[in-house]
Amino acid sequence: MKFLKNLDYTDVQDETWESFFKMVRYAADNYMSKTDAHLQLNSFFSKRYHVKFGEQIVVQKEVSDDLDKTDLQEITFEELPLLNESLEFYFEDPKLGTFLLNLASPEQLLTAVGGEFKAPDLKYSRAGIICYANQKDEGVLTFRIRGNICKQTLKEHINDESPSEIIDMAFLCFKVLIYASIPKLKPQKVTKKQLKFGGKPKVKGRPNIPINRVVYLPRAEIMRGQGITEETGKTHNFYGRRGFMRTYRHDRYKKMKGKIQYIPPVVGTKPKPKTKYKVVHA
């Protein structure tokens, strides 16, 4: 599936949102099959909240490349650091799309429309919402904010037949947030005029919101200060290693308790040999 970089915020801007909301609300209240209408409501509230209170994260390609090769070790949604409850992820990698992640509570979402309208039945007490666009249409992924952050947890929480590609991208967005929470990897505030790298996202009804750019730091800089020495002087065939992120919870970790450690992936010096199997007939 090819994800696009053109999320459409036109219908949730100040001059258009009320009429659009009435149309979507009517569909949710009257359609025999309400699944699509309720997903459209989730999309409306997520985008409306975003244009009023959200922020954008621009992710350097080298960062997403490394994080794609990085695993999470039992980091929970409760420990997930947030720059904002509503974040639009724009990846500079041309193969990746744009994704809107909303982790706001229903009460927070309702602040985006004020007190004029009666609150609709959102069918959940707290859930995460991811909006995206592909070549056919726009999509919405909803999931529970609970448990370990992993693809299996997302699959267990999702009730619809969501494509595996959007689950992969949701997982990557969570890894970007964890990466950006490490002090030395803190994102840099940038302006629209500074968005010369990778091209500006072609987003309809672009909201005027703060922009943060998550940038790549060389492996040596990340490793410095973490108390890990890798230079052993030994020569051997090294086939590479995936990166990992973990958090420290036990009291014995006096300096690291409550903090997240990131060890970036390492590219191997030689390609890993393929195992050949030979069938022997007895």
Image (spheres, grey):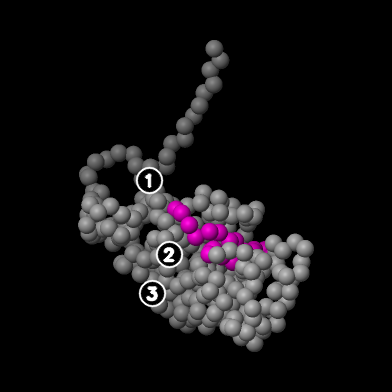
The residue to which callout 2 is attached is 177
**Between 226 and 144, which is closer to the camera in this rendering?**
144
Q: Position of residue 91 (x, y in %)?
A: 50, 66
Quick one: SS at disc 1? loop
Q: Residue, x 46% and y 79% (percent of image)? A: 210
- Report how far apart the C-alphas of labels 3 and 1 lie in the structure: 30 Å
The residue to which callout 1 is attached is 240
Counting residues from the start of the chain, the first of labels 2 and 3 encountered is 2
Callout in the foreground (2, 3): 2
Instruction: Judge left or right: residue 163 versus residue 53.
Output: right
The answer to whether residue 127 is seen in the rendering is yes
The residue to which callout 3 is attached is 188
Count of numbered circles in the view? 3
Which quarter of the figure is the N terminus placed in? bottom right
Instruction: Judge left or right: residue 109 versus residue 228.
Output: right
Counting residues from the start of the chain, the first of labels 2 and 1 encountered is 2
- Report how far apart the C-alphas of labels 2 and 1 lie in the structure: 25 Å
